[in-house]
Structure formats: structure tokens, C-alpha cells
Amino acid sequence: MHSAIASQRLDHQRITRPGRGGPEEVVAWLGAVQAQEYAAARWGLALRMSRSPTDAEIERACDDGRILRTHVLRPTWHFVGTADIRWMLELTAPRVHQAMSSYTRRLGLDSALLTRAATVFERALGRGPCLTRSELGSELARAGIAAKGIVLALITIYAELEGVICSGPRRNKQLTYALLADRASFKLQLTGNQTPRKRLIEDLNGDKDATLTYLWHLAMQHGGLWVSLAIKPANVKASRRDDPNRMGSYIAPMAQSDADAPPEEMSAGDLETARLYGARIAEIAGRFAPVANA
């Protein structure tokens, strides 16, 4: 069983079943890719492509802005697609700001200064080409803001989280920054016959347990509360397809349908599992509702 799970994970991660698209399709499939180590992250994308791409091809996708390398989800670099960067920032930036607040306070970087610095970046990048971090530091110096080393790094991360700047094309092996507005649309980008619902489903493609575990970890990282399923698994011989929690989940509901089955043929047990989970969330949320003064 463990080998089957490992095999399925490798398949859904596109390691044993590489995709046919380009590097941007790999990033879109995975949602976001850890990219703290730039060279290793590029190799990780190439590993998941079926047509043996060159390093130059991966680099070109980053330079062209088809893939963005920026700080999102956590205070670390990630590869993200242009269609996903804005909703990811909206969802996770507040918590990342909170996680970084002790560092910024210790270095005297208050909200007013950070906002002013981000405005300096926006104006400087709006006037001309992409700039390196050192060149952004020079722009701050001209505006009367002294920033080098870790201070400059924290300021650039703040501007990334605020959706002001993101990665630009590399210049002589140096990272440059561009305006996010120049590289990513403000609207959700849909392709072909995608709808927002279909896009969400595709973004969560992969092993069910791995997906739920990731979402649980993300909720914990952002100080959230997670409601467990609390439905006994239907995993005995007498269990039927239409029993609640037939997938044996504990974190949240899981469902399984035949690949060629239409939506209306979804298991009644899976639907009942979702209904019971919704009722449980409503009941627990009610415990936190404010109590009116008597």
C-alpha cells in the first residue's frame, strides 16, 4: 500500500509522468514551486517536462515573465504563474507580513517608511527598465531612505507582498525587479473553456490527502482554525459506495468518481459527507459567534 501511495504521489507531482507543456504549465499545475535556490528550482521544473528542455528555455520563461519568482505563501522565493500571483498574494500576504513584523520592527521599518519605499520603487520602475536590488537601493537613497543589506531585502519583500514589484529578467546573472502591473493582469486569467470553478478544481489537482494536508498546513501557517471531518470511516466489509466518508478521510471530505462519469452521477455518500461536514463547520463556527448582552 505504501508503495502504491508513493507511486501515486510521484505521478501527480509529474515526476514519473512529465507533462507535455512548457515550464509555465508545470508551475500552473503545481500552483507554486519553492524557488529559494534558483538553479535547483529550474532543474525541478525541467524534471517535470517530457521533452528534455534546456536550462536556457527555463530561464527564458522567467525572463519573459511567463513565470514569476517572488515572495509569496511564506517569506521565501517561489515560482508562481502570472494568472495566480494576485489571488495568492491577497490570500497569504497579510500573514507573511505578520510573520516578518518582528524583524521589521527591530530594524525600525515602520509602516509609513515601508509604504513610502514601495512608492519610490513604483515610480522608479515606472520611468524606465527593470532595476537590480542595488539600483533600487540607490533610488531609496536619493529619496532620503538609507537601506542596504537585510534592510533593503526586507523592503523589497514588503513591496513584493504588496503587489508592487516582482521578478524581472536577469541582467548579467543578477536578479532584477519589475512592476507587477506590467507582468500580471489584475484579472483572473482563464484559458479555453475554463470557468472560475473549473480553474479552482484544476489548481487543486493531485493526490487528495496531499492536497488537504497542504491546505491544513497553510491554514496553520496563517493562524487559522481547521475543522476536522469527525465522521467514522466506512471501511468495513459491510460498507457501501453510498455510505458517508467511504474514502476514509479524517481531515476533510474526499470524493471519488469514475473518470467518465458526469457530475450528476457523483456518489450520494460523498455528497452526504460534504453536507455533514458543512453542518459541523456551521455548528463549530456558532460557538465563536458573539453573544448578545442579556
Image (spheres, grey):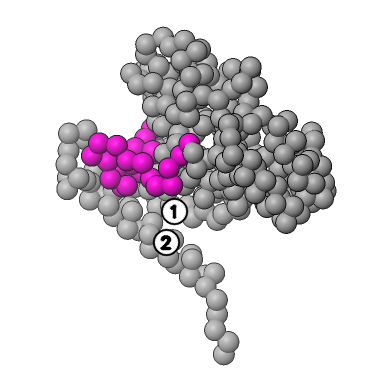
- Extreme-bottom residue of the structure: 294
From this view, report whether residue 126 is shown above or below residue 42: below
Which comes sooner in the sequence, label 1 or label 2? 1
Q: Is residue 102 visible?
A: no
Give the left or right position of residue 264, taking residue 277 as reference.
left
Q: Which residues are magenta?
A: 183-206
- Bin the neighbour count of mark 1 within 10 Å (Cα to Cα): few under 14, some 14-19, many 20 and up: some
Q: CA distance from mark 1 to mark 2?
A: 9 Å
From this view, report whether residue 128 is shown above or below residue 264: above
Query: Residue 11 appears at what percent x and percent y?
Result: 38, 22
Q: Which mark is residue 196?
A: none
Query: Residue 82 appears at what percent x and percent y?
Result: 45, 36
Write the residue at 64% across / 40% down. 124
Q: Are marks 1 and 2 in contact (CB under 8 Å)?
A: yes
Q: Residue under label 1, please give it.
A: 230
Write the residue at 43% across / 11% down. 53
| Label 2 element class | helix
Please name the amino acid that badge 1 sits on.
Ala
Q: Which mark is residue 280?
A: 2
Q: Is residue 201 magenta?
A: yes
Q: Nearer the viewer, residue 198 or 141?
A: 141
Query: Residue 64 appears at what percent x and percent y?
Result: 47, 25
Please name the amino acid that badge 2 sits on.
Arg
Give the left or right position of residue 39, taking residue 208 as reference.
right
The chief SS type of the magenta part is loop
Q: Is residue 144 visible?
A: yes
Give the left or right position of residue 51, taking residue 138 as reference.
left
| Label 1 element class | loop
Query: Residue 24 appears at what percent x and percent y?
Result: 42, 26
Write the residue at 59% across / 48% down. 162
Q: Give the quarter of the figure containing the N terminus.
A: top left
